[in-house]
Each structure stands twice: as structure tokens, then as C-alpha cells.
Amino acid sequence: MSSLLAHVAVGLTLYCCRKGQLPRLHVSMALPVLLAIAPDFDYFGIWFFHLRYEQRFTHSLLFCLMTSSVAYYLVRRMGWQSYAIPGFWILLLAACSHLLLDMLVGRALPLLWPFLTTEFFLHLAVLPGASHTGLNTYAFWRNLIIEACLLLPMLAMLIVFVQRKSLRQHVPEVLLVLAMWSGMLCVSNSLTMA
């Protein structure tokens, strides 16, 4: 599974990609973030009630569709100002982004549950995945840094592209990202050789 920070970053990125002027801070920013982490809410049943799920149905496309539909309906019903409300597609993408990130670490997921019990996976794991060894371990911080160096530049470029910002304004950030990526390559090469 990807780290909580990766899911939160994707949720915030999708909020920033929506149409309309971006408010500085609004409660509606929490919607895509909550939907991006919602498939992991079944952990509460695992941790507190010691439930065991044969298949984690929360990691299905149907669950993502249902949660984003309910969230969108409730937000519209509450009458929030329209400029701050993310559209339905942003909320759906936020929920589905969780599945994509988890698949990018090599997890098999029941995407088409309850119609098919087959679990789908990608043959190529791109992200290192969250380490469950604890906050004070080398593996946790290494994986978190690798994940951040891979995801954050792509998410930032997505916002720049969708908001149609000039790339020339962001030359320092692009150079910083290139330096981070080259540093990551050097570190990963030295770790694999050791």
C-alpha cells in the first residue's frame, strides 16, 4: 500500500486541478483528501474489532463510485458556495486514485467486486510502498522519500498543466526536481550495489 501522505497529496492535487478560483483554505479541500484515503477505512475494523476480510471490498471501483456519489450529494445538499465545491469527477478521481497508488506498489485489488472476485494487479511495481516497520526505522523513511521524490514532481506538473500556468515561471522548481531525481538515482544505485 502507498503511504498516507501519498494519498493525501493526490487528493489535494485533484482539488487544485478543479475549475474555478482556488480559495486559500476551505473545508471543501478535505473532501478529495478523505475520498483518497477512504478505501483504507476498513483498517478500523481490522485494528479495533480484529475483523478479517477475505477481500477488501473497499478497494473496489464500486466502493469508490458509491463514496464519491454520497459525498457529492451531501455537499450539494448542504448548500456550500459553488466556487468551492469540487465537481463529481474530481471526487471520483480522488477515490479511484487510492486504487491506482496501491496497484503501483504491486498490490492485487478486487477492482470489480462484487461482480468478479478476481484480483487485479500491475506486473510492474513503481512505488516502494509504505513500510510497516515503524516511524523510527530506516525502511520507513527511505520509502517515504522515494515515494515523495517520484510522486510530488508529477503531481506539481499536473497542476501546472491543468491550470495552464507558464512553465517558465517554475524553472527553479523544475531544476530542484531534476536534482532530486538525479540524487535518488545515485542513492538507489549505491544501495543496490551495496
Image (tube, grey):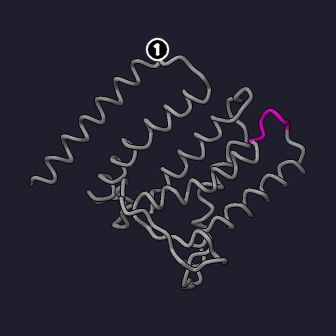
Q: Amino acid at mark 1?
A: Arg
Residue 176 drawn at (x, y percent): 34, 26
Residue 144 drawn at (x, y percent): 37, 51
Q: Which is the main secondary structure of the residues drawn in magenta?
A: loop
Going 51% across and 70% down the picture, which residue do you hit?
109
Q: Nearer the viewer, residue 146 or 164?
A: 164
Q: Which of the 4 image quarters holds residue 160?
A: top right
Mark 1 neighbour class, 10 Å CA radius: few under 14, some 14 to 19, many 20 or more: few
Residue 30 drawn at (x, y percent): 67, 47
Whether residue 169 is situated above or below residue 18 in the rendered picture: above
Whether residue 148 is situated above or below residue 118 in the rendered picture: above
Q: Is residue 129 left or right of residue 114?
A: left
Disc 1 target residue: 168
Going 18% across and 40% down the picture, which residue do you hit?
186
Going 74% across and 28% down the picture, which residue do you hit?
20
Q: Nearer the viewer, residue 183 or 141?
A: 183
- Position of the C terminus by quadrant: bottom left
Whether residue 110 is situated above or below residue 23 in the rendered picture: below
Q: Specify whether residue 180 is painted magenta.
A: no
Whether residue 180 is situated above or below residue 169 in the rendered picture: below
Q: Is residue 80 left or right of residue 23?
A: right
Q: Which residues are magenta?
A: 81-86
